[in-house]
Image: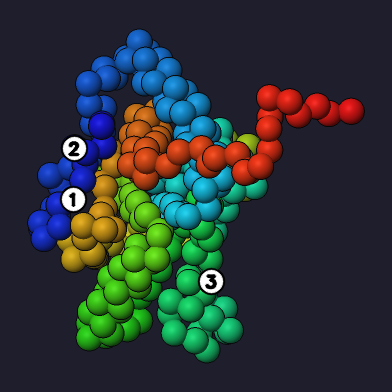
């Protein structure tokens, strides 16, 4: 249970500086340590495939994975690597961008609730309903009163999902400001990565301290028993993948789902296909 170490206990006060984004646990920052972590990740991904099949076959529960983090923290890479072994038929990724005119005509959770995974499925939010209490707060788009109101509504919303069969896994991919700088510079230098470039990332980088404070407050107030947060070190991509894969497998394993029984009235011992 690698990731248990990164669990934010309900009611605790999060100070992100206390979490080392460059941490790699028991895995040394060497080629040998990296290879060992990758091998463990591959085993977890293979196990995840079987657990997802049980989830899909039972169709009684669902799993919602919420990924949050600063620009370049690795949300896309986490999805691409960790979820590489699951059946796309039972998994959907949703990226929440700037609300549309139609979105703004409804409450802020309207567009989110529509994308919650149905029973039997895994849903992945690349950014999420938390943007409405992060970017809006940092840029002063809403008042503190509205932020507090939305945080309470988010907690009630997540409790509603849990009570109706959705397991919620919330992950904050924690990178350092220095690591973000390197990743942004890589996008500039590598022609194959320039398509990811967004000048807005530089503007948001100026608000780094504000975002750290907002994340600390949000994670502290919304990490609950039924919808906990995990602060995952994400400077080292190979360790990030291992930790997230470990938590996804653990969440699916905790459901203790078994393969559904075969249809009644069928004698498979004598059944012949002609």
Q: Position of residue 154 (x, y in %)?
A: 32, 72
Mark 2 and mark 1 residues within 8 Å of each other at the beta carbon: no
Q: Nearer the viewer, residue 90 or 243?
A: 90
Q: Position of residue 205 (x, y in %)?
A: 35, 57
Looking at marks 3 and 2 on the same chain, the residue that comes earlier in the sequence is marked by: 2
Q: Which residue is mark 1?
A: 8
Q: CA distance from mark 3 to mark 1?
A: 27 Å
Q: Which residue is mark 2?
A: 5
Check disc 3 and report its element: helix, strand or loop.
loop
Q: Quadrant of residue 265?
A: top right
In the image, taking residue 83 as reference, residue 108 lies left or right, namely left
In the image, taking residue 71 as reference, residue 111 lies left or right, namely right
In the image, taking residue 261 as reference, residue 21 lies left or right, namely left
Check disc 1 and report its element: helix, strand or loop.
strand
Question: What residue is drawn where x is 68% and y is 24%?
Answer: 269
Q: Which residue is mark 3?
A: 114
Q: Quadrant of residue 32?
A: top left
Question: What residue is drawn where x is 30% and y is 68%?
Answer: 159
Quarter of the picture holding the C terminus: top right
Question: Mark 1 packing: few (<14 Cα in 10 Å), some, or many (20+)?
Answer: many
Q: Residue furthest bottom?
A: 105
Quarter of the picture holding the N terminus: top left
Mark 3 or 2: the one toward you: 3
Question: Mark 2 packing: few (<14 Cα in 10 Å), some, or many (20+)?
Answer: few
Check disc 2 and report its element: helix, strand or loop.
helix
Q: Nearer the viewer, residue 194 or 16?
A: 16
Q: Position of residue 15 (x, y in %)?
A: 13, 53
């Amino acid at each position: 249970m690698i990731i248990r170490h990164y669990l934010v206990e309900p009611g605790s006060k999060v100070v992100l500086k206390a979490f080392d984004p460059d941490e790699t646990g028991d895995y040394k920052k060497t080629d040998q340590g990296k290879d060992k972590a990758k091998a463990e990740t591959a085993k977890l991904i293979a196990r995840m495939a079987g657990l997802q099949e049980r989830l899909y076959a039972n169709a009684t529960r669902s799993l919602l994975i919420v990924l949050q983090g600063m620009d370049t923290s690795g949300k896309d890479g986490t999805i691409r690597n960790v979820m590489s072994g699951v059946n796309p038929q039972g998994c959907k990724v949703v990226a929440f961008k700037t609300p549309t005119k139609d979105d703004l005509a409804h409450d802020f959770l309207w567009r989110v609730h529509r994308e919650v995974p149905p029973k039997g499925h895994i849903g992945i939010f690349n950014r999420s309903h938390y943007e409405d209490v992060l970017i809006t707060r940092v840029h002063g788009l809403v008042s503190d009163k509205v932020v507090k109101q939305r945080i309470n509504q988010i907690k009630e919303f997540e409790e509603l999902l849990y009570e109706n069969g959705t397991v919620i896994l919330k992950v904050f991919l924690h990178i350092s400001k220095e690591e973000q700088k390197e990743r942004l510079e890589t996008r500039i230098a590598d022609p194959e990565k320039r398509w990811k470039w967004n000048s807005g990332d530089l503007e948001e980088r100026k608000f780094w301290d504000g975002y750290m404070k907002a994340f600390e407050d949000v994670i502290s107030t919304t990490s609950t028993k039924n919808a906990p947060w995990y602060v995952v070190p994400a400077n080292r991509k190979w360790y990030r993948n291992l930790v997230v894969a470990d938590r996804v497998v653990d969440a699916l394993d905790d459901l203790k789902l078994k393969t559904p029984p075969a249809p009644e009235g069928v004698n498979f011992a004598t059944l012949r296909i002609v």
